[in-house]
Amino acid sequence: MAITGAAELLATWEAGLAEAPNGRALLLHRTARPDVDAARLPVLPVGEREADLFALRRALFGERMQVRLACSACREDMEFDLDAGEFARSLGGRGGSGDGGDSSAGTVVRVRQDGWDVEFRLPGVADLTAAARAADPRAALLARCLVSAVRDGAAVGAGDLPVPVQRRIAEAVEAADPGADVTLNVACPECGEATRAELDIASYLWTELDAWARDLLLDVHLLATSYGWSEPEILALSPLRRRYYLELCADV
Ligand SMILES: [Zn+2]
């Protein structure tokens, strides 16, 4: 991944300020995957996006992620480190671990059970967003992502899939796109109880980017005031040089 320049990243942050969390996540994903057409990003499997965002986090701010969580049993504050690089690798992005005989070709999983033969597309962010607005999100997601369902040679609609087949589809999707749901399971050092929590890498990364951007603007302000340089000139400096000049300003 090419690390984006400071000016470009600052522009991403500025664009994101006006956006809801979904729009911010999309902007971050665009930064992470400049190789993919922007219109295609919301269609990529959700787990692939999460892996992309972990890789971006690592490229921008390093491997070590600090996470704070309150114990669900005793409310004790827990603080621990996660490894963004490990997440990016383990989530893979490309899916297709290929277990249990279901073949996953590209972003479609196939389930065969009790005379049913079902093909199902791995949901992307666009699918989740649209389904969340429906009266029955589960049914809506099923209908959106169903590619084909055949029972004993006859085509069947999404509404007629029996629960066991639906469950097999959910399992196949999870196996093919494991990063879709990053759940942490942390044992409390005080009481020993385990706390489960979802890690939302998009909002985690946005919070960091926001802090970074505000710090950077302050640096620009200080350097512009001292040296009379323009914003583009200051942003073009490497972080190391920027730091040096700031130290020199402070010494004067
Ligand atoms: Zn506890």
Image (tube, helix red, strand yellow):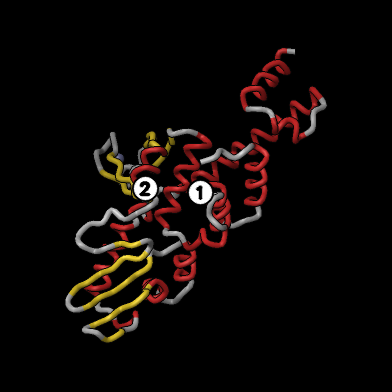
Q: Is residue 38 left or right of residue 237?
A: left
Q: Label 1 belongs to which residue?
A: 203
What residue appears at the point 67 percent right and 25 percent down from the top-left corner? 242
What residue appears at the point 49 percent right and 40 percent down from the top-left corner? 57
What residue appears at the point 39 percent right and 42 percent down from the top-left corner? 69
**First in sequence: mark 1 vs mark 2:** 2
**Which corner quadrant holds the C terminus?**
top right
Give the amino acid type for the residue marked by disc 2 in the picture. Gly
Q: Quadrant of residue 113?
A: bottom left
Q: Position of residue 16 (x, y in %)?
A: 62, 51
Q: In this view, does 154 lie to the left or right of 248?
A: left
Image quarter for ligand 1 equals top left
- Above or below, 124 against 201 in this view is below
Element type at mark 2: loop
Camera-nearest residue between 45 and 207: 45
Q: Residues within 10 Å of mark 1 (few under 14, many from 20)?
A: some
Q: Label 2 belongs to which residue?
A: 92
Q: Where is residue 170 in the image (x, y as percent from the top left)?
A: 29, 65
Question: Would residue 77 be seen by someone viewing this image from the given angle?
Answer: no
Element type at mark 1: helix
Camera-nearest residue between 152 and 78: 152
Q: Specify the farthest residue to the right.
A: 228
- Above or below, 73 against 133 in this view is above
Q: Quadrant of residue 228?
A: top right
Question: Would residue 180 be seen by someone viewing this image from the given angle?
Answer: yes
Instruction: Measure how far apart labels 1 and 2 are at the Cα level.
Output: 20 Å
